[in-house]
Amino acid sequence: MTMQEALPLRFLLVALGLLALLSQTVLLPGLAGEYAVAYPQVAHLAVPYAAAAVTAVAGFEVALLASWRMVTIVLEEGGLTLRAVAPANALTASVGLSGITVAGICAHAGSVESIGGPAMLLGLLAGLALVPAAVALRNRILRAASDSAGSRRSHRWI
């Protein structure tokens, strides 16, 4: 990957990070407050749900930082190497944490509080689907890193 190829990817990572930060600091707390006023019967859920949603977004931000690190590794090494293991693990853990947090919010809202209807089931399924997707992504990254390391070793002897 060249710097010209990495620049749009890094721009996208920065834009997503800024959007996540904006949603974490402005959108989610404001929305929780508006819903607490509009629906006083569930106003007690505004703070814990907002805190959980901010935690899920924080996990997404950590995944963005891990992705940035992997782009840096690709630029420095010319491809994914075994140095990508730590960022891949961080990416998997943070996306898994975000998915489980979203699934927990949706499960609590749908089953304990009986609010949200079918949307909570879809949110629960989507949150739980992030966990195996993150593990599959990690396996693919590590496979690419080991393949790259193997091809580098074989080219040294030629």
Image: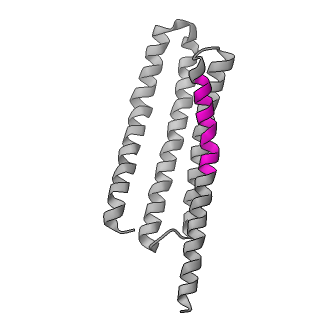
The span picked out in magenta is 120-135
Report whether 93 appears left or right of 7: right
Identify which residue is drawn at 54% across, 35% down. Answer: 55
Rendering coords of residue 41 (x, y %): 57, 7
Q: Is residue 142 magenta?
A: no
Q: Is residue 51 above or below residue 98?
A: above
Q: Quadrant of residue 101?
A: top right
Identify which residue is drawn at 47% across, 14% down. Answer: 35
Q: Is residue 143 above or below residue 28?
A: below
Identify which residue is drawn at 58% across, 54% down. Answer: 137
Secondary structure character of the magenta stretch overall: helix
Q: Quadrant of residue 109?
A: top right
Report whether 76 appears left or right of 56: left
Q: Is residue 98 above or below residue 148?
A: above
Q: Is residue 132 magenta?
A: yes
Q: Quadrant of residue 121?
A: top right
Q: Is residue 49 visible?
A: yes
Q: Residue furthest right?
A: 112
Q: Is residue 89 visible?
A: no
Rendering coords of residue 153 (x, y %): 57, 83
